[in-house]
Image (cartoon, helix red, strand yellow):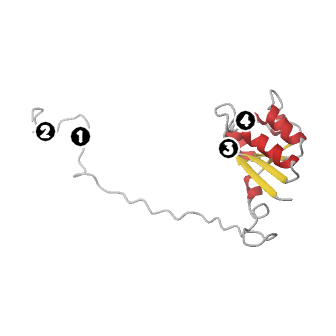
């Protein structure tokens, strides 16, 4: 039995391809595989119990673990109590080291190596001579050039 982790970031209201992820998860689960579907960004929009998504409900009924990322829910004003039955809110850290497996050896885990990006310092430069008039004429200057 293989393990699958599917991540969806698009909502099914703007693209029909996003609706295929829950169907793929359901089909993989029915084939006997262990499947988790994580919804992030706009992918969390169909998780509300009302009006509900038939594809997500079918995936949950088939035994797919469906997780909705907490920050995305919060940003879109979806309370966790309004989620469909069987869908859990979870922090994004859930897809860290415990869920990602190494490709070199089965059963091993990949080290989590996300490091903050080093940013270059911002350098300020003086533009021109530093004397700006912004609509006022300086004494001795003419408006005709």
Q: Is residue 108 left or right of residue 40?
A: right
In front here: 134 or 37?
37
**Which of labels 1 and 4 is toward the front?**
4
User: Residue 37, position in %: x, y?
Assistant: 78, 48
- Camera sees residue 86: no
Q: Are marks 1 and 4 in contact (CB under 8 Å)?
A: no
Separation of residues labelled 3 and 4 (CA atoms): 10 Å
Q: Which residue is mark 3?
A: 9
Q: Nearer the viewer, mark 1 or mark 3?
A: 3
Question: How many C-alpha atoms fall within 10 Å of the one at disc 3: few (<14), some, or many (≥20)?
Answer: some
Relative to 136, say whether 107 is above or below: below
Q: Which residue is mark 4?
A: 45
Tell me which label, 3 or 4, sits earlier in the chain: 3
Question: Pointer 2: residues within 10 angstroms few (<14), some, or many (20+)?
Answer: few
The first of marks 4 and 2 along the sequence is 4
Front label number (3 vs 4) = 3
Q: Secondary structure at mark 1?
A: loop
Judging depth in this view, the residue of 5 and 30 nearest the camera is: 30
Separation of disc 2 and disc 3 at Cα? 60 Å
Please identify the quadrant where the N terminus is shown.
bottom right
Residue 63: x and y in percent read: 89, 46
Of circles 4 and 2, which is in front? 4
Disc on res. 133? 1
**Which residue is under mark 2?**
139
Say few, some or many: other residues with alpha carbon within 10 Å of mark 1 (under 14 / 14 to 19 / 20 or more).
Answer: few
Q: Determine the CA span between mark 1 and mark 3.
A: 49 Å
Distance from disc 1 to disc 2, alpha carbons, whole Å, reads 11 Å
Q: Earlier in the sequence, mark 1 or mark 4?
A: 4
Q: CA distance from mark 4 to mark 2?
A: 62 Å
């Amino acid at each position: 039995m293989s393990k699958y982790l599917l991540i969806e970031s698009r909502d099914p209201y703007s693209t029909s391809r996003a609706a295929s992820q829950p169907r793929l998860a359901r089909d993989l689960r029915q084939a006997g595989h262990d499947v988790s579907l994580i919804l992030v960004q706009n992918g969390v929009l169909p998780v509300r119990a009302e009006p509900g998504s038939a594809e997500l409900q079918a995936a949950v009924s088939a035994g797919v673990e469906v997780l909705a990322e907490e920050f995305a829910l919060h940003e879109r004003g979806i309370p966790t109590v309004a989620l469909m039955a069987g869908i859990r809110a979870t922090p994004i850290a859930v897809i860290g080291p415990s869920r990602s497996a190494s490709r070199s050896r089965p059963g091993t885990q990949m080290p989590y190596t996300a490091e903050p990006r080093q940013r270059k310092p911002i350098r300020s430069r003086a533009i021109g001579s530093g004397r700006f008039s912004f609509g006022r004429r300086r004494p001795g200057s003419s408006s005709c050039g």
